[in-house]
Amino acid sequence: MKIRHVRIRNFRAIRSLDWSIDARFAVLIGSGDAGKSTVLDALALAVSLRWNPPLSDADFHRGDTASPVVIEVTLTEPPAALVREDRYGHWLRGIASDGSLHREPDSDHEMALTVRLTVDSSLEPVWEVIRASDEDGVRIGAADRGRLGVFRLSDAGSAHLRWSRDSALTRLGEAGEVNEALLQAHRAARAAVFATPPEGLAKSATAAGEAIEAIGGARLTQPRPGLDPTAGQRAGSLLLHDGDVPTTFLGLGSQRLAGIAFQLEALDEHSVALIDEVEIGLEPHRLRHLVRHLKRREAAGAGQVIVTTHSPVVVEEVEVTDLNIVRRDAEHTSVLPVPKAIEGLGADEPQATARGGAAALLARRIVVCEGPTEVGLCRALVDHWDKSEATPAALIGTVHRNGHGNSAPTKAECLATLGYAVALLSDHDLSRREQAVYERRLAAARRSGVLHLTWDRGAATEDQIARSLPVDAVRQLIALAVELNESDDPEMSVRAAVAARLGDGTGRLEGLDPVEWCRQARASPPAVRAAIGAAARSRGWFKSETRGSRLGALVAPALPALQETDPLRATLDRLRRFVYGHREPECTHEGAPVG
Amino acid sequence: MGTGNPSAPTRVLPSADLAQARAVMAAAPCHVVLPAGCGKTQAVASVAATAAQDGRRVLLLTHTHAGVDALRVRLRHLGVPPDARNLATIAAWTARLVQSYPGAARSDGREGATWSEVCAAAARALRNRHIAGMLAASYDVIVVDEYQDCTCAQHDVVLALNAIRPVIAFGDPLQAIYTFGDEKLVDWRQMEPLRPLSLPCVGWRWRGVNERLGAYLLDVRRSLLAGKAVDLRHPAVRWVDASPQATRRALWASVNVPGTVTVIARFDQQCEKIAKSLSGRFDVMEDIEGTRLLETARLVDASDGVRAAGAVLGLAKASMAKLPATLTTKLGPLQTGRFPRFQADTSAAPALRSLQHFADAGDPAALLTTLDALDGLGATLCRQEAWRDFRRSAVAWEQGAASLTEAVRSVRHRSRILGRRLATRSVSRTVLIKGQEFDHCIVTSPETMTACELYVAMTRGSRTLTVVSPTPMLEPSAG
């Protein structure tokens, strides 16, 4: 079986969703409350073997029971037993090669069945096989829904390590033998207690027997302790052991892996397996292994696996085309399958973007930074801003990622095309030849809706910071450069780097105060600031995420002292508004507003 | 589809039948001709039972509800579980397919499509890859009974089915007695790719009972197939001259004969006349849908009170002999919508009073009172089946059926499902008794029958055959 189309209305967080899928392996990603798990819940409710699922008003969108919950799941490759004329043979639908759903199958369509679950305010679920959303269907019972072979793998703790009712271990073997083993064990235990009752217990039993007789209640001829014949026969008391050690002693991750393994083993190859938050409890290497294992089911060419994840490890491990991005706005929840290629971008750009910054795909708003300095800067700024913002950036789902220099605009464009809100923070430290290509990429990124943040023309990040900061902050910047300098004489090294850029003034600089440097070098303050900026950039004073972040910690508190029109402040104010999803006061940047 | 044993027949098929059924299945696609009384229904049922026993599923198509009922009884007797086969009329089956897949059938779904249009649409649907696949998943073999009644359009449907799963067609061209307007019936000389398969022809109906009659009827068959007249001067058959006295004597003589007796006539009017002349000893057989009851019920549902009362009286007049003339003469006025005056002291007065009450009230209770009053007149019932089911329908109506018409439908449907019990002595039209079997059979007005009708009529009795006709040499009518 293969789930090909999902239509959901008014189910929990989802007001409306239409998702077409054609993959045998699908990974649902998206920010925290986008509704990934709700999609799996909906699938499990509509098409798996459940006799009497608990439903409540809370299952309706916003708790409003006036509009019914509707979940429609269309599957291809249904089992022959369900296609028979006396089952649903008169209810076949078609899926055309473009993925569109049709009331009847044409010969060149794929044949499909649609199951619809409707729940109205009576909370009575009705399952039907239907031909079209606006038509009545024919009822389908739990047994036939079970035959559709959709299973939600559950995380029932140690339950899957036990031979209990419906556990995977039981499904792997003979259910009858479980009861037999328990019955025998219990009889042996009863016999053992009867055979050698502890003396104290025997005494109290005798005393109890006499007391009952004395009060005229009953006459016990042989009062003695014994095991309750109805106790201890729960099927779940049979547990998988390794030698003498019960497997419940394994770590949580191992237990969960074992549970998944048993459940997958109990499924036939045509089944559809649903796994929510596949990464729970697993270290990266075991998670990678599990994902590869699941992908192997895909390679078998039958059945389907649909998982949700918050883990960048999973995003890195799978093909980018396995990813489906779930997003929610007020009206709709959408599921966007990530395409293999995006027009206008290089081949496999989505794959490169995903592997180069998997965590970003799990966010909502992304700041693509051109280099490590900018990444560090951003991090420090957001840390500082978070203190005064109502909602921390992490909750909004904003992350920043390294765009790796020249490819940053392409990364930004790719992410914007995938529907993320993207800002690109870049500077101008390129050669003239590179500049032309770069400008073209920037223009394309802006057309895709990327918010482009940058400095004065020709200024690199370090240049702009040295140019704009109040003089006290420039002193701190020099002190930080000294602190981070790894040469034998850090002060000397920093001073020399600035002096070299002041030309004639070499050798005349002393101390670490830039105001003094103006006097000593007989240079204007802007010239000294330019020299500091150039030194910082060319010597790579702040060229790492850690160093950039130290720089940012220094810049952040200094910003309010700057004029709003100052280029540093203006750009970083826009960055702040983007990160926290605030509206731009007016449309000042060239690209279309996003998010 | 495993040979899962919950679905295996509980009763064991005789080994000869099993062997024959296997041979037939091995020869599929094929067609089998078996004369009347030679175990055709048993052969069809055996194929289904054998298939079920082998874990194979069968689509079993026939033409009439009567045929469906006969096969259902036979299959139940052989212990074939309902989920191992699908048994339906070709008409119902094709209509459902077209209704489910109007697109693939390229049918516009309009009302009033002719049966041949429905068949053509179904044949188109069957060429759809997925519908064909669905049927291939549903069935291993397809059996069509009463193939002689297939129209050319239905034959095309069967050929389309044969492209999906092998078809086995059973029938007898000499029993093609239904007509379907202008639609042409299938030509048995052109049955390719359903190859002819001969089975031993054993007259089971007459075996150990009246084998001489069985042999004679095979001769009759040969004559009729050759277009020759049938000679009734033969010791196996009793020829009665069609003079009124001789006819009456022959009919009355059958009243006390042990076993089941049927008198066959060509038209319902003749049947009613014969039943009335026999003072209710014989019951007129109704068609399976209960057409006469439905017509009455529709009139009751749709008309004003007086005409509704007229419809009830009309049914009573058709069902009873010797109703008082003071009652029957009121039928005409009632049917024109006028309730006639009547004298309060005649025997018919209670019935007329209740009819008048029913005309006013129009409710089920008043109808039941009317039926009681009509029963109280002491007339002779000669349409017991119709009258009994009408009363049942009235009760169902009173108990909450949406209308009397609906009540009739459900009563007739229930008696079909439960298997209808036929009267020991019946008068019937030829078209109603195909596939039925009686101990004694009296054929009247054979000179008006076609060769096929004549053959069907003559082959109904297993013990005796009496033919009432003006001459002992029967020339079949051209139709």
Image (cartoon, rainbow, N blue to C red):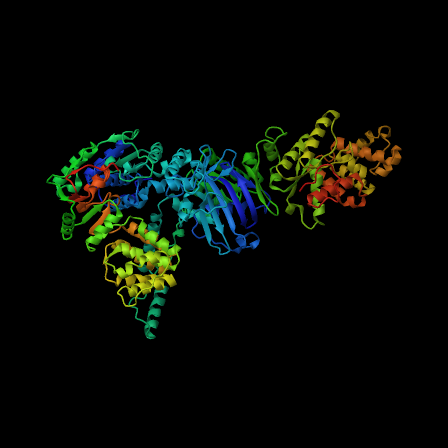
Looking at this view, is B241 or A58 the one in front?
B241
Residue B179: x, y in percent? 30, 39
Q: Can the viewer see residue B422 in this picture?
A: no
Outermost residue, left side: B235
Looking at this view, is B66 or A397 the one in front?
B66
Residue B301: x, y in percent? 38, 56
Q: Is residue B455 above or below residue A13?
A: above
Residue drawn at (49%, 56%) of the image: A122
Residue drawn at (87%, 33%) of the image: A523
Q: Is residue A340 left or right of residue B348?
A: right
Looking at this view, is B226 or A86 the one in front?
B226
Q: Can the viewer see residue B81 in this picture?
A: yes
Q: Is residue B157 above or below residue B360?
A: above
Looking at the rendered image, the quarter that the C terminus of chain B falls into is: top left
Residue A557: x, y in percent? 76, 45
Q: Choose top left, top right, bottom left or bottom right for residue B435.
A: top left
Q: Is residue A305 left or right of residue B375?
A: right
